[in-house]
Each structure stands twice: as structure tokens, then as C-alpha cells.
Image: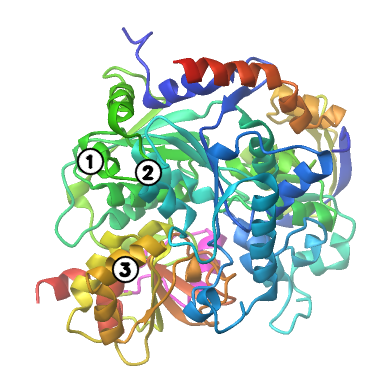
Amino acid sequence: MEPITTVRSRTVVLAATDIDTDQIIPARFLTTTVRAGLGRHLFADWRYDAHGAPRPDFVLNQPAARDCQILVAGNNFGCGSSREHAPWALFDHGLRAIVSTQIADIFRNNALKNGLLPIVIDAATCRWLIEHPGVEISIDVPSATLTLPTGARVSFPLENFARHCLVNGVDELGFLLAHESAIGAFERRRSVA
Amino acid sequence: MQGTARTMLDKIWEAHAVTPEGVDTPAVLYIDLHLIHEVTSPQAFAVLAARGLQVRRPDLTLATMDHSTPTRTEEIFGGAPIALESAAAQIRALEHNCARFGVELLGLRSAQRGIVHVIGPELGATQPGMTIVCGDSHTSTHGAFGALAFGIGTTEVGHVLATQSLLQRKPKSLAISVAQRLHCGVTAKDLILWIIGRIGVAGGAGHVIEYRGAGIRALDMEERMTVCNMSIEAGARAGMIAPDETTYDWLATRPRAPQGEAWQRALERWRQLPSDAVAHFDREIEFDAAAVEPMITYGTNPGMVMPVNGTIPAHTNDPAFTRALAYMGFEVGAQLKDKTINVVFLGSCTNGRLSDLRAAAQVLRGRKVARGVQMLVVPGSQAVKRAAEAEGLHGIFLEAGAQWRESGCSMCLGMNGDLVGSGQYSMSTSNRNFEGRQGVGARTLLASPLTAAASAVRGRVTDPREILSA
């Protein structure tokens, strides 16, 4: 994973609450054996009509959404299945952060492992962001703060280990493999017990 | 002595912490059973291959195919190729990866194949006190045995393959106590839908739910699995139920359960698992099973649920609710009872076990699926299929005009060829009524096997108690 310290971008807003992973990427696009190239299926059923043509009224299809790296969404984003194809598709589309008042547990874990920032902020700030699509905001990982266009800074929860991994591009599998002797000792202890 | 009293979650967590969590690092949590399937594993095996790693404990890893795998007999046992080439490629990839890394695969034509959350328990691979993971959110099902079981993403599948461990923060605990017993005609599916309707689709976020109380103790193992299965639909990390005699009776004859002296030693360990009497939970909620009625969803998440005889409630100023009703073609204040349906799906990891098929067969015996309704019956595993056929249940379904398929996830999620058409109303015993879940534009009504079967007979949304008492 590439180190990630800041994301500065205009926002794109999907105000709906409880956006589930079947909306982020429908199951029929999961019959793949690779992780690349899923961005074209992102929000497929909201983004394209029955003939595969982009729906002009869907926000990600609008010119203002181009190059936006921050998605602001309604409460409980990413609920539903454990498919990591959801953060893969969001990242592949060019998004680098999801901002909401709540982000579902498994999606949050999956996002962090792919350099997609799951940012949970207070309801008032999120409501303001939803009401002001397209504003430029910045997210600073080391200080775990989000800076609004007014210069006001709001903090978001980010546990130390996740912050360390993001800022330093730590490979979690490598971190786990370094515990090999402890895992082996645990296995030996249990086989005796 | 609240200081030393522990919940079942505490006990299982502490017994599996290779290293405890600290301020700066999560725990390294050891995994006892890793279940894998064709859809969320190929990219994980690719990481192992790229880094020259092996599967650390193939003996604790079990693979099967269910999600994108077709359910038509000719596609499984020959006579026709697998219609979806991309699904066939996933199946070949799993066969290749399991052979290369030495992982046991209950493959396409195995008599033990089935939905991953059905076969783990029926083989006795799922046992109390274990940590169990799978790249699938409905892994929570296995918690019915007093295991800590949760869904993970593909990167974490790779972590477990390579190290048999995961980096985890301990979730909070939520006790849901259910008093009294369910009434006749009301099922475990109705109970869990009712609970989700009350706590909401994010109501369990960050928590492991422990279901307890007389209403839970009265449930058999398959009913307990239905309840734990849908914990994720309340946003919970996992659901669990303390093991008891019901659990041990169910497990005693399973092929992969401990045998002989090992069984006795296991029983002694398992009896220590239930939460201590004064254990502290981070949250506690109480419900009354006697208040539960047959339930049906009316919207596009499992929290949008009401009694079958109810009317769609108003949610002012909620755009998601308005959008959901527009998608479903429903209006506030409307009844769903007697609403015409087009498709009935009986199956899935929620309701695809033998007792579910028996319940539906009880309604369908000597009756016909209504004209214009397509009904698909998909057993949760090949073992469930054989057991149902031994009892003659398949004959009841076929006689009624339903289709009888090979096991798999089928219509629960539209990725294996079994689809609901756009705009059609599907009464489904599965777990998710999300937009497009069963096919683009499909409108899903979640319900119990009894309600689904009764509705199949009438061709309209029906309270099963009307038919059961007829």
C-alpha cells in the first residue's frame, strides 16, 4: 500500500443513508478473479440505464464530479456484504476517502487495507457537507482532522495502528508474518493443553 | 465479583489472543477454522503466490463453492456447460488454488458441497468456543454454536491463509435477551426480522450480539442459525448463542465433531463457555418472543419490516425511505397482505436447511403453487438435498409445481444465473432485500419459509397462520 498522509479535493455527495455494498458494486460483477478494473462497475445500477448508457442525473456522471477524491455519504455507508470489491471499485474510480456519520464495520476494515480513508464525523458537519456539494476540503491523516473551506477543523476517530499503517504504507501481512514465532508458540501451547 | 466475571465473547477472545491488543496495536487473534469459497478467495491466493507464501494451516482451512456456482443439475453433473463463463472461471480458479496449496475442497460434484454456512455446521467442523472466519458476512451463522464467527474481506482472507491469524480490535458486547416463546406459525426468521426492525440496520454496529433468554433457549439449532445469520443485517460484527444440551445433541453425531474421549474433554471445555451470571455487557436490550408475529419486509433493507398483516409506516423527512418505497412500488399506509407476487425463493444460508424445507412442505403438501408464480426450492447443501429426498419433500415441491435444484446461494444474490426479473415481486427466505440484490430491478420481500410457502399457494402475500389453521 502506498503511504497516504493527506487528501485534498472537492467533494461529491450521495446523501442516501444505508448505502449497501450491493449498490456500490452489484454481485454480478463479482465473478472475477482479479481486483483491477472494478471502477467501471461502481454504483452500476444507479449510474447506467438498462442499455448501459450513463444516467445524466446520477451525480457521479456529472462534470462536477470529475476528479473528486472525496465521497460524502449518508449514515451507515457500506453496510451489507463483506465484498472487498466495494472499496476496490471506489478506489479504482479515483476516490480516496469516504466521509459519513457512520461507516459499516467490515467495509471500514476493507477500506483501510486499500488506502481508502473511512472518515466518520459529527452529524452537524456531515449535514453541512451534504448541503454543500463540491466544496474543497482536506483530510490530514497524521492529525486525524478534516479541514472545512472555512478553515474550521474537525477531528475524526482513527486508531493509532491504522494511522501508522496509512502514513507509512505498512503492509499488514508483513506485520503479521513478523509474529510467526509467537503464532507458532501459541499453536504449540494449545496442542499440549 | 463483576471484575472477574466474563462474557462468552471475553472467554473466546482471551483464549485466542496470540498477543493481546495494546494502545498502538490490535490483537493478533488466532483462527480455528477458515472457510473459503470461489468468489472472495482468488485475489487472496494470488497474493500468496506472488509473495511465495504457503497456506500455514491447510488442516484448519476448508473450501467449497456456492456463490456463483449454478444450481441447475445439468450444469453441475454434466450435460450442459456452466452457463456463466466468468463463474466457471472462478470455479476452476478455486480448484487450482486448493490443489496448489493443499486445501481440502468440497468441490462441484462433492456429496458434501453446499452453502459454506450450511456445511460447516452439518459436518461438525463448526464447534463451540472456536474462532471462525470466512470471506462472507453471513459467517455470523456459526455463532449459533457458541463460536466467535465473523465475515472478513479478501485481504484478510490472505492474512488468515498465510498466518492463521488476524489483526483485530475486540468488539463491544450487546446482550439481546428474548423472553417467552414464539407462537405457533411464528418462526426464528420472524424473530430476527422483528429484532432488526427494532434496533435498525446499524443497531448492532461495532458489537458482537449474544442472544439469550428463554425465547432463544427454546429454539432448535437450525432456528438459532437463522437468528445468528442475520446479525450482520443489524450491522453487528457477529452473533452468538451459548452452547447447551441442544447444541451438544446436534453436534454429537457429526462426522468432524470430536469422538470418544475427545468428545468428553470437548464437552467439559464447552460447558465453561457461557457468559458468567454477572458478566457485564456494554449494552443490553430485552424483547418478548410472544409479541412477535409473522414478518415481511416492505422496503430495501431488512430494517424496513412489519407484520404480514400490518400497514407500511410513515417516515417523514427520510429520503432513503421515500426512495425505497418508490423502488418497491409501495405507498405509506398500504397493506401488503394479498399483494400479488411473481416469484418465491426458498433457500439460502438463512433458511435453506432441512427444517426450513420441512416447514414449507408442510404448507405445500397437497396444494399447488398459484398460477403465474415461479417457485424455486434450493437446498442449502447436497446433504440437505439428500435428506429432503429421503423424506419425500422434493416430491411435495415438484407436485406443487416448484423447481427442485442443486444446492447453492442461488437467488439470494444475482450472480449465478438464478435471477428475479426487473419489476417483479419476489418473496424470498433469504437475508437481503437491497435494490437489485436478486436481479436488476427485482423487488424483494423477505419472509419466513412458512410465509413464503403460504404466499406461493395463494399467489399473494399471505399470513401462514391462515393456511396452517385451515
Residue at 62% x, 40% y: name it. A123
Left/right of residue A52 with respect to residue B428 in the rendered view? right
Instruction: Pick the residue in front: A91 or A181.
Output: A181
Q: Where is residue A96 shown, x and y percent of the image?
A: 82, 46
Left/right of residue B226 with respect to residue A134 in the rendered view? left
Reply above or below: B156 against B370. above
Residue range (magenta): B312-335
Residue type marked 1: Asp
Residue type marked 3: Thr
Check the residue under mark 1 and report the chain it is in.
B
B319 falls in the magenta region = yes
| Neighbours of disc 2 within 10 Å: few (<14), some (14-19), many (20+) | some
B66 falls in the magenta region = no
Instruction: Pick the residue in front: B255 or B181.
Output: B255
Which residue does the numbered mark 1 point to in the structure image? B249
Disc 1 from disc 3: Cα separation = 41 Å
Reply above or below: B438 against A92. below
Which residue does the numbered mark 3 point to in the structure image? B311
Residue at 66% x, 70% y: name it. B88
Which residue does the numbered mark 2 point to in the structure image? B124
Q: Is residue B157 visible?
A: yes
Q: Where is residue A176 shown, x and y percent of the image?
A: 71, 26
Check the residue under mark 3 and report the chain it is in.
B
Q: Are marks 2 and 3 in contact (CB under 8 Å)?
A: no
